[in-house]
Image (cartoon, helix red, strand yellow):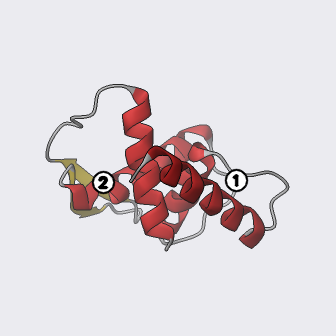
Amino acid sequence: MEDWQLDFEWLKTRHYLKDSLNLDVLPDLQAILLLIGIQELGFKLSNFSKEEKQDLMHVAVCGLLEDEGYFKFKGRDEDGWPHWDQVKALDLKGIKPQEELLKTKIIKYLK
């Protein structure tokens, strides 16, 4: 996907979430990862701690990158939280290529 296409699809995705969730502002990458993490968790918690929010974003990243071969689902712990084993290291160097990969996977996830 070319840069302009990714930018367009990403903006469209952010607007879709803003409208669907009746938000006042467009969600950024971290907010969207948090939302996906909550979805992947599969049960509702209230008032997430900072650590739980980080864990939820990690859940989202693992889930999104599983089909790329970076992670393999291991199972759920006694509290119901999903866990993955890292199969291979992320071969993208720098933040921009990593963000582009995540944005592409988020767009696909939400379609």
Label 2 close to label 1 by CB (< 8 Å): no
- Outermost residue on the right side: it is 24
Q: Residue at x 64, y 50 (%)?
A: 48
Please say if 35 is above or below 87. below
Q: How crowded is the residue under tag 1: few (<14 C-alpha within 10 Å), some, or many (20+)?
A: few
Mark 1, residue position: 47
Residues at marks 2 and 1, CA–CA distance in whole angstroms: 27 Å
Mark 2, residue position: 65
- Residue 111 picture location, percent across and down: 49, 74
- Residue 5 picture location, percent across and down: 50, 54
- Residue 20 picture location, percent across and down: 73, 72
**Tag 1 secondary structure:** loop
Q: Quadrant of residue 96?
A: top left
Q: Residue at x 64, y 54 (%)?
A: 11
The three-letter amino acid code for the residue at tag 2 is Leu
Q: Tell which circle, 2 or 1, labels the residue nearer the N-terminal end.
A: 1
**Tag 2 secondary structure:** helix
The three-letter amino acid code for the residue at tag 1 is Asn
Quadrant of the snapshot with the N terminus? bottom left
Q: Residue at x 43, y 43 (%)?
A: 100
